[in-house]
Amino acid sequence: MASQAVQHAAEAFPQTQELKTHNHLIDDKAALDAAWEQDGYWFFRDVLDKAAVARLRQSWIDELERNRVIDPVGSSATDKSVAYNGGSLETFPFRMEPIAAKRPWVQFVAEQPINAFFTRLFKDDPFWVPVVEYRATPPQQDRTKSRIDAIHQDGPFSPGIPFRICWIPLAEIDADIGGLMLAEGMAADRVSYHPKVEGGSNGAIPLDAIPADRWRRTTYQAGDVLLMNLWTPHTGLANRSDRFRLSMDHRVMAKGDKCPLVGIIEDISESHVVIRNAQGEHRLTIDPETYVRNTVGQKLNGTAITDFHTIGREVIIAYDGDRASVVRPPH
Ligand SMILES: [Fe+2]
């Protein structure tokens, strides 16, 4: 009985419906904008050049081979993902720091067909915010745990940066592999569903805050891309397959949007920050409402600001006039 109850709790997640596809709206800016508000996402099926996605995926495959958690792939296809071979995950870099250090996104977004797709979509050059998560998620080890990672909206963690979340599956992600699941039609009012917890950080969104019939996902394929509104609640769904889940989570805007400053910290205190980038030096004030944050989205206050954000590190700053509204690290 007890084990059945555990099994039930671990499997329990809302029934999901199929994501809409928005391919037919490309080139119709008004319809795209309306869908962005109403649906809270754009899902484009089979629009990214598969050879470019395969070149990007190779960084993940190389890293998995180096960690001996997959068998050598040789010349076999990897677009349906790769099987976990049961190798030790003790030293596995779950946040893929070795890939992050190589910044493979830079080459990917510069590939002609990739750049052409986003330029056509925005009718403007894309501006890639260097906030990138590289994920190679192995099968969930503790299957008594919930399949839902953490329901959240990105908006309350980066107030004032109007970027679009750009989630790119690098290989097939089916229902067993899990991956991204989102709540449709909950972004238009820009309501934060996060309870505020101590220190001004955002607590996790409880499952029952989202109507059960809103959840959407699909079987994602290499070549698909999901752009998501900052106010759309979403979560990862644990991997219950025998394969790795391979994806890249990026942020993009149109050049003409109000893009954040990206630069290297030259000076910082609890009340100001100075950064330098190709355009020169920028000085901004920090006040108690500025969402200065760390890598996991916690708001930093007082001396925690200068303990975490130090001179010489890269930082992303959203601003109003000369006041910083968000100060965040890239990763
Ligand atoms: Fe997210």
Image (cartoon, rainbow, N blue to C red):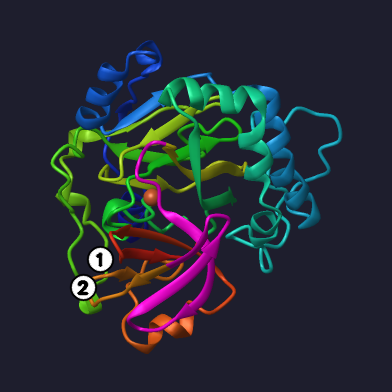
Q: Is 326 a magenta residue?
A: no
Name the quadrant of the N terminus. bottom left
Apparent side of residue 11 relative to residue 126 in the rendered image (left or right): left
For badge 1, the amino acid type reads: Gly
- Assess mark 2: CB under 8 A from ligand 1? no
Q: Can you give x and y, in whole percent of width and height, for residue 156 in the image?
A: 26, 57
Seen from this angle, which residue lies furthest bottom?
303
Instruction: Let me know if residue 139 appears in the view.
Output: no
**Measuring 68% from the left and 28% from the top, which residue is drawn there?**
52
Q: Is residue 129 above or below residue 264?
A: above
Q: Which residue is mark 1?
A: 203
Apparent side of residue 231 relative to residue 115 in the rendered image (left or right): left
Q: Is 270 a magenta residue?
A: yes
Query: Which image quadrant for residue 101?
Result: bottom right
Q: Is residue 235 above or below residue 120?
A: below
For badge 2, the amino acid type reads: Val
Q: Which mark is residue 140?
A: none
Q: Which residue is mark 2?
A: 197
Disc 1 crowd, CA 10 A, few/some/many (<14, 14-19, 20+): some
Magenta stretch, residue numbers: 256-282
Q: Earlier in the sequence, mark 1 or mark 2?
A: 2
User: What is the magenta segment's predominant secondary structure?
Assistant: strand
Query: Secondary structure beneath disc 2?
Result: loop
**Measuring 34% from the left and 24% from the top, which residue is drawn there?**
18
Q: Can you give x and y, in whole percent of width and height, for residue 278 in the image?
A: 58, 55
Q: Is residue 230 above or below residue 5?
A: above
Give yes or no for contact between labels 1 and 2 (Cβ–Cβ under 8 Å): yes
Q: Can you give x and y, in whole percent of width and height, for residue 292 in the image?
A: 35, 71
**Measuring 39% from the left and 13% from the top, which residue is drawn there?**
27
Q: Can you give x and y, in whole percent of width and height, for residue 186 in the image?
A: 19, 38
